[in-house]
Amino acid sequence: MLESIFGQGDHNSLTMDKPHPDSLLDTGVQGLISRPLDRVDGPFKVSGTATYAAEYKIDNLAHGVLVGAKIGHGSVKSIDASAVKAMPGVIDVITDYDTFIRNPQQGGETTAPTQGVKEVGYFGQIIAIVLAESFEIARDAAQRLHIEYDYAAGAYDFDANRDQVDTPPDSQIPAHYTQGNVDKAMTQAPVTIESTYVTPSQNSAAMEPHASIAVWNDDALTLYGSYQMPTSDAQQLAKSLGISAKKVRIIARYIGGGFGSKLGIAPESVAAAIAAKRLGRPVKAVMARTQVFDATVRRSNTEQRVRLAAGKDGKLTAIGHDSLTSNLPGEDYFEPVGIGTHFLYRGENRSITHDMVPLNLLLSGSMRAPGEAVGMIGLECAMDELAEKLGFDPIDLRKANDIDTDPEKDIPFSSRQLSRALEVGAEKFGWDQRDPRPAQRREGEWLIGMGVASAARSNMLQQSAAKVEIHADGSATVSSAMTDIGTGSYTILAQIAGEILGIPVEKIRMSLGDTNDPPAAGSGGSWGATSAGSAVYLACEMLRDKLAKAMDVDPGELTLKDGQAIGANRSVALGELVGKGMEATGEIKPGKMEKAMTQASYGAHFAEVAVNAVTGEVRVRRMLGVFAAGRVLNAKTARSQCLGGMTFGIGAALTEDLIHDQRNGKLVNRDLAEYHVPVNADVPQLEVHFLDERDIYANPIHAKGIGELGISGAAPAVANAVYNACGVRVREFPITCDKLLDGLPAL
């Protein structure tokens, strides 16, 4: 994905072909690592001085408003812009049927997205942009634009089109995987369960809408955009426009959330770039909230058939996890529902399959913890059902199926503390107070129950680079095209550099989110801080060696602390050692370790809920999570990520449901009033605990991704608690009052 940046000064490159047992972060001399430091970007955000994509002050700026199709399938017959162009303040109406993006691009891809908007694949597909001297004029004109369509029959109903199932090509996991004979094992096992779980489409609903400002300087484009992965996004944008990637610069200093929806470029980026080129002046295009829902990406709906077979000792002999999802016709991406099922539990007979129904609905793509967030709903609810049928405590069943080696690849885990997380969580949560019989605990008209679920999220390392400079005044600058989407990258990378170089965090300047800086994989897949953090580590490791040489001491005898280099009975200020300045670039690459070890983060979720015996209302009363994700680099930002993931889990369990009109595919709840994400009143005080861990096989900083671990397993913990509270097992999510009422115990 990344072009080589080397041959440009000193560099330190590491491919993870072997374990990295020793880490410079172990010394703790500066005392920065793992501490709950405040975010270095916090003051800028709370004071309003952090500049987001739509906020850059650009002279002679034209305002663009996107226009979406008002049919679900067909083609654009004509656009009559004459009346709109005559409106005062309107500059132009632009469409490029061949170049405009029909579908956004998936994350990490370096090719252009699907282009060509004359053919309409889904309701809301962006087909034009209206330019005016003000946003208000452009918005008014966009609403008045006259468009005629040729209508075509579309496929909008999942159930009605399930006979059109396709098997997609293999992706990060195989679309179909079989081992042994699940059908035979199901007939021979003393205890089995088979259940089907249904989850709806979901939207990332990030606070900041997708936005771009396009500025051309001759034939070079600078795009100020809200994008998670600028390095690959710049390549996507260049391919879309038919220009060299060297001519495209993306700047994404601050991003108001993404959750996967901003991994690849979206329609506003190309529309703004084309409009700016034609107008000869900068153009800003910001998606309306409804357009974010209509024309970015959704998490696919899923139908999951889960089969489990076990002996009377609780040990699984078979796991079947067969899923059906949906996407636009011609798209290969499938929600990897069974990704966690591949390695979470024992079972010599295994069938994990993914099939897809092509529908004329907006693009299905990555959303926080793609695969695990919804796939573990099926698996972990099924484990709860199996535990009840066996007469086992749900924790004991999970511990009985914990393993030391990958059940499919027969390779060890790089680290794994699943059972420990379950044990610690049970003690801290008071699991021993749970009555295993449903609907036994009542407080007035409220039925109270507890639930548990395992958490697991694959760990990935991605090629990334970073440059670190020490200046003559003893300060430092860390630069990388890595982004901070609200996860704390600015702070964590500063902590790594500060710890290794002995420089206080307040003397470290961060430059992130600019493709003019060393390329990075960006924020996605929970690899951001660990991949870019490893690159920063390697740059600082080289600088440490250079400082030792300047001090004329062995690197092992050098101590860097509080801006001083200490060695050979001398203490010298860093500024004096570096002269006019000293710099190094680090680059990390995945290697043999990702094949030699199965790498993942683990944890356990515990939830207590109250179900109203009269209305069926569900209230989450408390949740607790215990997580093991390698070295925790910043206790505060890590905790915040887990809190956010657990909140996502509450939404997936109880409220979130993206609804399409089955006549034309139009989203009917396409704003934050009707798409129900959990709000403050829905979320109790959440408790997060971390297990001490170092993963020497993952990277030189021994940390693993945590941003998506917190959502994995959170929803089924709530669902299992609902069943324990009232005795109603809901298998179609979200769990709303209407699905509980008929089964509630009599008053």
Image (cartoon, rainbow, N blue to C red):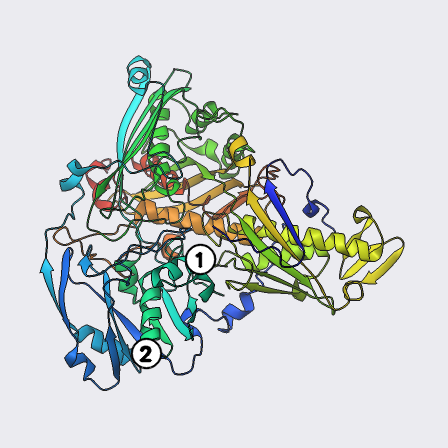
Say which quadrant the C terminus sits in: top left
**Residue 483 x/y as whole percent:** 50, 59
Judge by depth and name the residue closer to the eye, 222 or 353.
Answer: 222
Judge by depth and name the residue closer to the eye, 234 or 570.
Answer: 234
Q: Which residue is mark 2?
A: 279
User: Is residue 437 visible from the viewing direction of this image?
Assistant: no
Q: Amino acid at mark 2?
A: Leu
Label 2 crowding class (10 Å Cα cut-off): few <14, some 14-19, many 20+?
some
Judge by depth and name the residue closer to the eye, 488 or 645.
Answer: 488
Q: Which residue is mark 1?
A: 228
Q: Quadrant of residue 219?
A: bottom left
Q: Give the CA separation, mark 1 to mark 2.
A: 28 Å
Judge by depth and name the residue closer to the eye, 456 or 432.
Answer: 456
Quick one: SS at disc 1? loop
In the image: residue 693, left or right of residue 290: right
**Residue 120 x/y as whole percent:** 18, 57
Taking the spot 71% from the left edge, 60% from the top edge, the residue there is 503
> Which of the two labelled residues, at mark 1 and mark 2, occupies the earlier sequence position?
1
Label 1 crowding class (10 Å Cα cut-off): few <14, some 14-19, many 20+?
many
Is the C-beta separation of discs 1 and 2 under 8 Å?
no
Q: Name, please, the residue furthest toward the bottom.
A: 88
In the image: residue 73, left or right of residue 264: left
| Residue depth check, mark 1 versus mark 2: number of the one nearer the observer | 2
Q: Is residue 434 above or below residue 348?
A: below
Q: Is residue 496 above or below residue 747?
A: below
Q: Quadrant of residue 194?
A: top left
User: Is residue 572 visible from the viewing direction of this image?
Assistant: yes
